[in-house]
Amino acid sequence: MANSHSHASDKHGHLIPTETGAKTGVEKLLDVVERVGNMVPHPAVIFVLLIGLVIVLSHVFYLMGATVTFQAVNTETDTVENVTTSARSLLTADGIRFMYSGVIQHFMNFTAVGVIIVAMLGVGVAEASGLVAALIRKLAMVAPRNMLTYILVFVGIISSIAADAGYLVLIPLAAAAFLTVGRHPLAGLAASFAGVAAVFTVNILVKPLDGILVEITNDAIAILDPSRSISLTSNFWFSIASVLLLTIVVSLVTDKFVEPRLGAYTGERPEDDHQGVTTEESRGLKFSLWATIGVMLFFAALTLPPGAPLRNPETGSLIENSPFMNGLIVFIALAFLAAGWAFGTGAGTIKGTVDVIKAMEKTVASLAGLIFLLFIISQFIAFFTYSNMATLAAVNVGDWLEHVGLGALPLLVGFVFVVALLDVIMAGAIPKWAIFAPIFVPLLMRLNVEPEAVLAAYRIGDSPMNAVTPMNAYFALIVTFAAKYQKDAGVGTVIALMLPYVVVLFVVWPLLLVLWHLFGLPWGL
């Protein structure tokens, strides 16, 4: 794609366009998005304002008597129940008590905080030891420059089996890898973020989320046909096709549009930015490899034998609701800790346990700003959930779409975009599906649409918006990563980067769904 303008950069790496021709309409639109987005206040201020808005609106809807009745899956009893939900005010005596007495509990319930701290304890040691930098340089040496995007996007999609590791590890690594090979680091960040977030619900591997979504789907199927059910791998073939297709699509968007728009990067580079690895680092990488193998063998003993302690004690499953999968972030943290410690020992960057502890302390200290923001977000989510406004919106929009009278295929595609719209305010995949499944699964089954197709449509609608919604708990972290390479990067910078991916995915992915349905291809095993 020909550029309509070139770029210079200031000392911080911020891009300054130098006009060589008229900008295209899309380039002008993204420039506006970036300028407007960067005028947005600090994310903490945004969420404080949103908390105020939720408090006011909760009381307005409460006074209006807003109520909805719908069928929802009770995930504790695996039964479908008629549920009536009403708006709850945060300005009543009960609401005020909830806000005041629950501050600490709301924060404790926000598991993203614990996940980040635990993961970064291991990752911090790996980074402080020099392992991450050495791996990046090694990757730059062995990976063809024109295949780097495809590799990082594919790994990002696969990382959804442990999504937190994708956000915390792969995205900053991808930015640094692009920088090392002379490409723009924000392009690497954008490509990996798209893989991790915008293609989140599909994988070539079965993951814990699949078990929950399938269980809710089967409960919804039972409303119409109690004798029918789908399996854990009901979307297996569609997921594999989606992963392969979207790896190519996301990579092409990066290489042909996002990176050319960014231009050449001439900002600050790490002081130790050099080609290749030293003899000490090569020794450290060997030590790291053996340490990683040791961790793998240790966990293999805890997971692979029948009746192993980290399998599901009731079903024996290693994937579905097993201690191993539920605590996967601990495995990742320990793997990085062992690999980083071993690398540091071999390379001479870690002399003893004191250095390891100092690396952990430094990592946790660097998370202070993010932890404060997550504290504010945890209160917002708790207040919003208490008010029931998200449920009221989901049910009313779902009922409207059901009664429009469209055919099966338009309704299936329309369902994708309704899920996408609500994903902006209700980011969790499970609560949305618990509401939507009892409505749309029986409805589309009556129109001869397989329940597997409805679940596939839900996967599509629930994914791309993750890359641009502030309700993504890691969105602020991505802004922080971007600011490392562009000092004044803000919300608008990240949205402008990710918007092309979202638009293209909402064209290509639903088209794959339509073709899959029309040709009657098997959705899974």
Image (cartoon, rainbow, N blue to C red):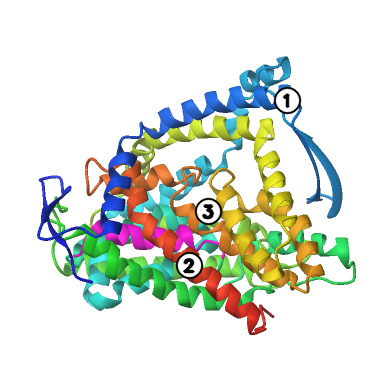
Q: Residue at x 50, y 68 (%)?
A: 296
* Up-down relation of residue 102 to residue 470 (above or below): above
**3D distance between C-alphas at marks 2 and 1:** 39 Å
Q: Based on the displayed image, in which of its 4 quarters is residue 192 positioned?
A: bottom left
Mark 1 burial class by Cα count in 10 Å: few <14, some 14-19, many 20+: few
- Name the residue tied to disc 3: 330
> Compared to 377, does 514 lie above or below?
below
- Which residues fall within the magenta stretch? 183-201
Between the C-alphas of marks 3 and 2, the distance is: 37 Å
Q: Which residue is mark 2?
A: 507
Mark 3 residue type: Val
Q: In the image, is residue 187 part of the stretch drawn in magenta? A: yes
Q: Main secondary structure of the magenta part?
A: helix
Tell which circle, 2 or 1, labels the residue nearer the N-terminal end. 1
Q: Residue at x 41, y 28 (%)?
A: 45
Q: What is the residue that sits farthest to the top in this orientation?
A: 93
Say if the magenta span includes residue 119: no
Q: Residue 88 bears which disc, if any?
A: none
Q: Residue at x 81, y 60 (%)?
A: 219
Give the residue type that dot 1 points to. Met
Residue 64 is tagged as 1
- Residue 450 lies, in percent from the top left, at 74, 73
Most foreground residue, 64 or 505: 64
- Please say whether residue 418 is visible from this viewpoint: yes
The alpha-carbon separation of the residues under discs 1 and 3 comes to 47 Å
Depth order, front residue of 60/176:
60
